Amino acid sequence: MKNIPSEIILHILKQLSSDKDLVQCVHVNKRWSYLALELLWYKPNFIGSSSWLGFFTVIQSTQNSFPYTSFIRRVNLSPLSSLIEDIHIITLNACQRLERLTLAGCSKLTDIGLCALINPRQDHGIGSELISIDLSDVQQITDTAVLKIAMCCPNLQGFNLSMSQEQQSITDKSIIELAKHCKDLKRIKLNNCTKITEKSAVFLALHCSRLVEVDFTNCNINDHALTMIFNHCRELRELRLSQSEVKILQISDEAIMSSFITSKQVKDSPVYYYDQLRLVDFTAIYTISDQSIKSLVHAAPKIRSLVLNKCIHITDESILAICKLGRYLHFLHLGHCSRITDKSVTKLAVACNRIRYLDMACCIEITDKSIIELANLPKLKRIGLVKCFNITDISIGALTSHVRISHSLERIHLSYCTQLSVRAISRLLNVCLQLNHLSLTNVHSFIRDDLQAFCRSPPKDFTELQRRPFCVYSGKGVQDLRQYLNTLYDSSLTLNNNLHYI
């Protein structure tokens, strides 16, 4: 046993799937104890306040038999987010080898705690080894903390500042410094940091060319900034630019048409400039047109998730271009793209047969013809047809006539599809047994007390006028509705003979 190198023992211990087995290894001998404890403390698991208290006690003690603080590489305090305060994270300054720190939702934290924790001195504080920090929904953070991170964490690769509410304390000042000092940055999320402008985006594009994930949701980004991102970040995989809360939209076709995306061949690069791009979110960028979508698909032929919600100028031309994504496309959001018709959607269903999620809410030109083709998608899990007024029982018949989709469909949104009958929905429930969410708000045949008894409660801020037609079933509500309808109709019922596809 003494002749076995520690590296081999460590490799063997890593294969153990249970922490309980590692705990048993601690009792073998001192060398095994050291190696097992190193793995156990690599990422401490905080399942409650008692585990945090024990952790806190150990790392503060000077009488430990093993250097526990040097074992710790990853810390996730989000499960204790409601309890964590500045004084708690300051105790982590002894963990000088810490690589990943997750503080998501720790709303009580301020700049004081973070600035005390992150320190350039190697003998006190963390920073030099840190490669990822998650401060999402830490609302009290300001430029002060971000500047400290920029100065003390030169190896930083991931930085998450996503906020669920508007955040105005983070500005271009700190993000520009972050871009200058953290040139290995790969992922940055600034969701709802509304004071961020094109200045930050330009500096990130110029200094952090290895970026693979960028989130500028509701930031004030313009054409120039987006062009710079496209021109300098060749390894981009995810690009989120939703502008749904931005008051003055500054992005247009110009951002794409003046970038390398429109180039057929760039010197010393493959034909497809963005071969790695997998996710694009253009929500509410209503100024872009078919021209931009066609250029994007040509330059990035392997996009997996594409969000064009509220891109109101998108027409069938864009959808026909999207068809070229073929088997790569899994997620497509076309909500409020009201100019889309059956002409392109029927071809989309054939060309992109691996679609799992499709939302066509408010696509008012869509008819049963499109749904009949979409019903052939073997992996479709969710389909949104809210306010597709032309949808009838024929569409429901199509969705229930294919064995594969009946085994995969989990969520379907049919609110405001006023032509649907109770019999058709009953058939849907009995065929699609994986269904766990069904929305039928304002479907006239379901505005009945006996059927609404199984739907979930409407939001508290709804008026009485909104509450009356509200009809959304989830989880057990779907099961209860199925059972109730089966008492009204034969569980093996079929649709009326006149419900044939076209």
Image: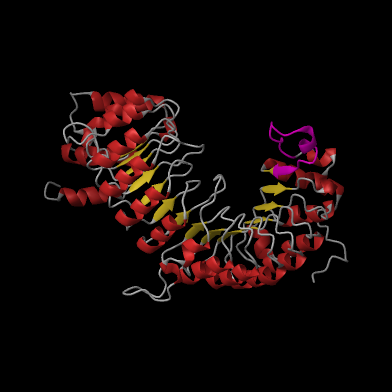
Quarter of image, res 258? bottom left
Going by the image, does 443 lie left or right of 150?
Answer: right
**462 in the magenta segment:** yes
Where residue 386 sits: x, y (%)? Answer: 71, 52
Residue 227 in which image quadrant: bottom left
Work out whether 256 lies above or below 417: below
- Marker count (numbered): 0
In the image, residue 482 sits, relative to residue 65, either above or below, namely below
Looking at the image, is 247 positioned above or below residue 354?
A: above
Residue 30 in magenta stretch: no
**Residue farthest left in this picture:** 3
Start and end of the magenta stretch? 455-473
Which residue is rendered at x = 46% and y = 51% of the image? 221
Residue 389 position, x and y percent, is 78, 57
Q: Quadrant of the C terminus?
A: bottom right
Where residue 186 sits: x, y (%)? 34, 53
Using the image as rendered, state which of residue 59 and residue 214 is in the foreground. Answer: 214
What residue is rendered at 75% in x and 33% in y?
A: 463
Q: How is the image coloured?
A: secondary structure
Horizontal relation, residue 88 to residue 95: left or right: right
Establish if 424 lies above or below 182: below
Residue 436 appears in the picture as rendered: yes
- Which SS type dominates the magenta stretch? loop
Front residue of 469/173: it is: 173
